[in-house]
Amino acid sequence: MRSFQDVLYNWLTIKVVCDARPNDTAAQETRAHFEEVLADEYHVSNLDITTDDVMYYVSCQKGEEEKKMKFPRELIEVMLNQINLEPEKYENYPTEE
């Protein structure tokens, strides 16, 4: 079983990648998966993200309560940094229609 914090962390990590790489279909699909898990399993809505130089702050509605969590930028941005360091390993393969 995965914890709410783990799913939120994974969602935020891939959302950062999606924001930087809007044409990355694999990242978009992964983000959609985590959003589905957050909605279906954790009843999350109204996700909002703010940042400063050190942290990401996420607030959301989880059922009847408001949740606020923070994550260090260096942890959230590690995947994007890896992609940027070795882009040839993360080529985008568009979906066939």
Image (spheres, rainbow, N blue to C red):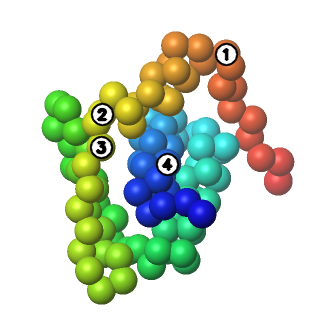
Q: Nearer the viewer, mark 1 or mark 2?
A: 2
Secondary element at tag 4: helix
Q: Earlier in the sequence, mark 1 or mark 3?
A: 3
Three-letter residue code for mark 2? Arg
**Is 21 placed left or right of 91 in the picture?**
left
Secondary element at tag 1: helix
Occupied quadrant, residue 48: bottom left
Q: Disc 2 designates what residue?
A: 73
Q: Residue at x 24, y 74 (%)?
A: 66
Q: Earlier in the sequence, mark 1 or mark 2?
A: 2
Three-letter residue code for mark 4? Asn
Q: Disc 3 designates what residue?
A: 71
Occupied quadrant, residue 40: bottom right
Q: Earlier in the sequence, mark 3 or mark 4?
A: 4
The answer to whether 90 is drawn above or below residue 72 in the figure is: above
Q: Residues within 10 Å of mark 4 (few under 14, many from 20)?
A: some
Occupied quadrant, residue 68: bottom left
Q: Disc 1 designates what residue?
A: 88
Q: Residues within 10 Å of mark 3 (few under 14, many from 20)?
A: some
